[in-house]
Image (cartoon, rainbow, N blue to C red):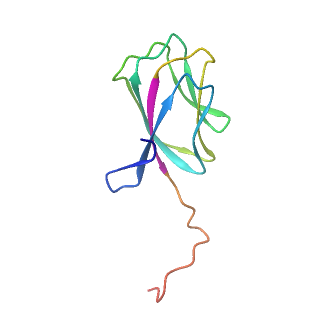
Amino acid sequence: MSGQTLQDEGWLYSDVDLSDNTTVVYTGRCMLRSLHITVVMSAHTITVDDTGTPVVGLPASGAVGTNQNCGDLLCLTGITVTPNASSTGKMTVVYKPLHDTANASPGPNPK
């Protein structure tokens, strides 16, 4: 159920199968809120990158119910999950896309 809205705040989640080599969760500016292990991880570490720059690591053998709070970490170019080639397990990534409003034009009749 990738891409579901959490409440009305714009937070989304993406389910990631750790047996896949690399999963691009989102491309673009966003905030990374948390990671949740939903199927027990194998004895391999997991890295979450801001498209090439490691920002969060998860230790090997994460148990179901393990939650990693990421403190609404700003990712400038996106979120990519990179497990070891032999990894197994599943996790949910909670994130919020950020839309650049610097060049947005105001609506009609701005005050």
Q: Residue furthest right?
A: 52
Tell me where the magenta segment starts and ends, as one range: 90-96
65 lies left or right of 1? left
The spot of residue 25 in percent (x, y) is: 55, 40
Foreground of the two, 92 or 60: 92
> Magenta segment: does it hold 95?
yes
Q: Is residue 30 above or below residue 81?
A: below
Residue 54: image quadrant is: top right
> Which quadrant is home to the N terminus?
top left
Q: Residue at x 49, y 46 (%)?
A: 31
Relative to 28, is 61 on the left or the right?
left
Q: How many numbered marks have been drawn onto this rendered protein structure?
A: 0
Which image quarter holds the C terminus? bottom left
User: Can residue 85 be found in the magenta stretch?
Assistant: no
Residue closest to the eye, 76 or 96: 96
Magenta stretch, main secondary structure, is strand
Q: Is residue 15 above or below residue 47?
A: below
Tell me: residue 44, above or below residue 81. above
Which residue is farthest bottom?
109
What residue is shown at x 47% (from left), y 20% (from top)? 89
Q: Which image quadrant is residue 40 in?
A: top left
Q: Residue at x 46, y 89 (%)?
A: 109
Q: Residue furthest top?
A: 43
Q: Position of residue 72 (x, y in %)?
A: 45, 43
Q: x, y (%) of residue 93?
A: 46, 36
Q: Return the residue nearer the eye: 27 or 74.
A: 27
Q: Position of residue 105 (x, y in %)?
A: 57, 78
- The residue shown at (62%, 71%) is 103
